[in-house]
Each structure stands twice: as C-alpha cells, then as structure tokens.
Image (cartoon, rainbow, N blue to C red):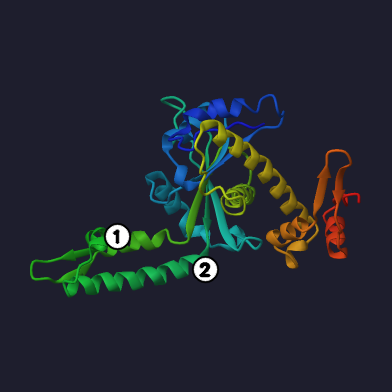
C-alpha cells in the first residue's frame, strides 16, 4: 500500500483512520510504536478508546510517572529484575486509574520502567560537574542567559550573594537518572515491550536512507505532480534498499562490505538496450558474481 500522508500531524486524531487502512491488508493485529517526543496524555487516552494496541515512550518528569518510579525505585536493582541480555533492570506497574474509561474505572495500561545503571552513574557525574559550574557562575556573578532556568531551579541566592544549593531539587533530579519508561496496553513482558520499541530504529534508518543515500533532503520540485512522482520513485527505491540491507544481514556481509559498497559494485555492471535486440549485459566480474550468489540474487543473463 502506498499513500502519502501529511508530515506535521499534531496529535493522534488521525490514528483511527490510519489504522483502518490496514483492515483489508492483514488479519494480524497492528501495534503502534511511538517515540517519547510524541507523548501526550490525550493521545494515549484516544488510543485506549479506539482499542489501538500501542507502545508509547513517556517522560520521567510526568507526575504519574514520577509517582510510579518512586514505588519501583527501592527494589529496582534487585537481581530478580536484572536482564543480562540488555544489561538493564526492569519492572512494570499497572496504572489503570490514570487513563479514565469512566468516573469509576480506567483503561488497562501498564508502565514499564527500565534502569541503565551505567548510564545513571555517567549522568550523575555530568550533572554534578554542571552543578559546580553553575554555582561558580552565581558566586562570581558571571551569569549566562542559557543557564537562567537552572539557577532558579537548583540554587537560592541571598541579598548578600550567598549561594545555597536546593538539595531537594537536586535529589529529585538524581533520583530519575538512568531511567526510561514505556507505556503499553499489550500483555507483553517488559523485555518484549523493549524489544518491539527498539525495532523502530529500523524505521529511523529507513528515513536516513531516504535522506542520505536516496538524496531526499531537498526535493527541488517545481510542481505538485513532479513531487508526487519523485515520492513514489523514492518509495520504490527504499523498498529495494531495505530488501538489499536485509539480505546483507542474512548473508553476514556487513563484516566485509557497507551498503554503499555493494550498491557501487552492482552499479559497475553495465547494460545496453537496443530497440531491435533488447537488453545486452556487459561483463560481470567474479567478485560481482559472488555477491549475487551470497545475496541469493539471480545473475543477469549475458
């Protein structure tokens, strides 16, 4: 299915319509995976109301997330919550009363919390270093406009320029370092939810291929029809590039080649089309033949 969509959708109101497009294409349930930057409480509520299965990143600064983390944090680093495969600690908590279905009941949503202890330690060190720099700027009255919010949040300055750290604000900041949170209305485990969420990297890499390898950073089109044509051609090209990448992964070729190197190798295979005799393929080197075989591609007839 190919259909251009607006690139500046502000909320989830278009999701029910978008999901309906898949009704005739598959009998399998569709699951949305949404980045933390797209989080809005009203969007989560709408997906619950429309029975859309989702995994949604959420910010640790959200009130109900902070409350959930305060419950989970004391036991988070127990060995029973550690996952060696991801080197993370994980717990989940039902938050059924956050997204209301009615005055007395809520939708079934689970908060999955993850802790990266190594990242937490690194973030704490960087924060303490920042805190000392901000304190020195206040003491020497060498204030920076970009740090005004931090000054107000973490320090008290008396009339005689005595600087005092707001320990409660600092402790609150430190408490959530290394944590990240995913919301889901599925029945998956925390490990499964995380695995699905990380799969979205494949989509982001596909967009990177569009922008960089397929030259879509600047469209340079003077007509609507030309734009639609270029988008469709790029859509087909992205399918081919994605399939080539998939086959390279299956053949373990990334240890010897980059995607660009494989494309360049195939680009050297020349062909000539004559209106009477059809297509003639030029010389194919042994190295190129081997690539065709490794990628399970048919070698062009000569």
Q: Residue at x 64, y 34 (%)?
A: 30
Quarter of the image with the N terminus is top right
The extreme right residue here reads 302
Q: Residue at x 25, y 64 (%)?
A: 166
> Residue 110 or 232: which is nearer the viewer?
232
Viewer-side residue, 176 vs 233: 233
In the image, residue 92 sits, relative to residue 284, either above or below, namely above
Q: Secondary structure at mark 2?
A: helix
Residue 214 location (% of width, % of height)? 61, 50
- In the rendered image, which quarter is residue 270 located in? bottom right
Res 146 label: none
Among the 4 quarters of the image, the one containing residue 19: top right
Inspect this view and state whether residue 51 appears. Answer: no
Reply above or below: 73 against 5: below
Relative to 160, is 55 on the left or the right? right
Numbered label attached to residue 169: 1
Locate residue 183 relative to residue 262 in the image: left or right.
left
Which residue is rendered at x = 70% and y = 59% of the image?
259
The mark nearer the N terminus, 2 or 1, is 2
Residue 25, percent from left and from top? 70, 28
Lateral position of residue 299 relative to residue 213, left or right: right
- Check disc 2: other Cα within 10 Å, few if <14, some if 14-19, many if 20+: few
Residue 261 visible at all: yes
- Position of residue 144 measured from the top left corner of the image (x, y, whole percent): 23, 66
Q: Residue at x 35, y 73 (%)?
A: 129
Name the residue beneath numbered marker 2: 118
Q: Count the marks: how many?
A: 2
- Of residue 74 and residue 261, the one placed in the foreground of this image is 261
Q: Nearer the viewer, residue 299 or 71?
A: 299
Contact, CB < 8 Å: mark 2 with mark 1?
Answer: no
């Amino acid at each position: 299915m190919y259909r251009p969509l607006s690139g500046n959708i502000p909320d989830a109101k278009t999701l029910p319509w978008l999901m309906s497009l898949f009704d005739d294409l598959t009998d399998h349930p569709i699951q949305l995976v949404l980045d933390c930057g797209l989080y809005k409480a009203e969007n989560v509520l709408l997906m619950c109301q429309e029975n859309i299965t989702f995994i949604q990143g959420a910010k640790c600064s959200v009130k109900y997330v902070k409350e959930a983390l305060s419950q989970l944090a004391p036991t988070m680093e127990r060995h029973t919550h550690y996952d060696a495969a991801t080197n993370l600690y994980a717990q989940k908590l039902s938050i059924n009363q956050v997204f209301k279905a009615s005055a007395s009941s809520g939708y079934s949503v689970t908060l999955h919390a993850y802790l990266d202890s190594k990242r937490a330690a690194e973030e704490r060190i960087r924060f303490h270093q920042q805190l000392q720099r901000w304190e020195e700027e206040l003491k020497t009255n060498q204030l920076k406009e970009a740090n005004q919010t931090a000054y107000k949040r973490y320090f008290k300055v008396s009339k005689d320029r005595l600087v005092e750290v707001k320990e409660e604000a600092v402790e609150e900041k430190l408490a959530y370092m290394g944590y990240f949170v995913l919301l889901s209305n599925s029945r998956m485990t925390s490990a499964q939810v995380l695995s699905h969420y990380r799969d979205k990297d494949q989509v982001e890499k596909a967009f990177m291929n569009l922008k960089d390898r397929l030259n879509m950073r600047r469209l340079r089109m003077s007509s609507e029809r030309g734009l639609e044509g270029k988008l469709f051609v790029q859509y087909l090209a992205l399918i081919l590039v994605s399939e080539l990448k998939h086959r390279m992964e299956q053949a373990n070729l990334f240890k010897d080649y980059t995607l660009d190197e494989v494309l360049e190798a195939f680009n050297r295979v020349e062909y000539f089309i004559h209106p009477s005799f059809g297509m003639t393929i030029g010389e194919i080197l042994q190295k190129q033949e081997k690539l065709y075989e490794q990628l399970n591609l048919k070698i062009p007839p000569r």
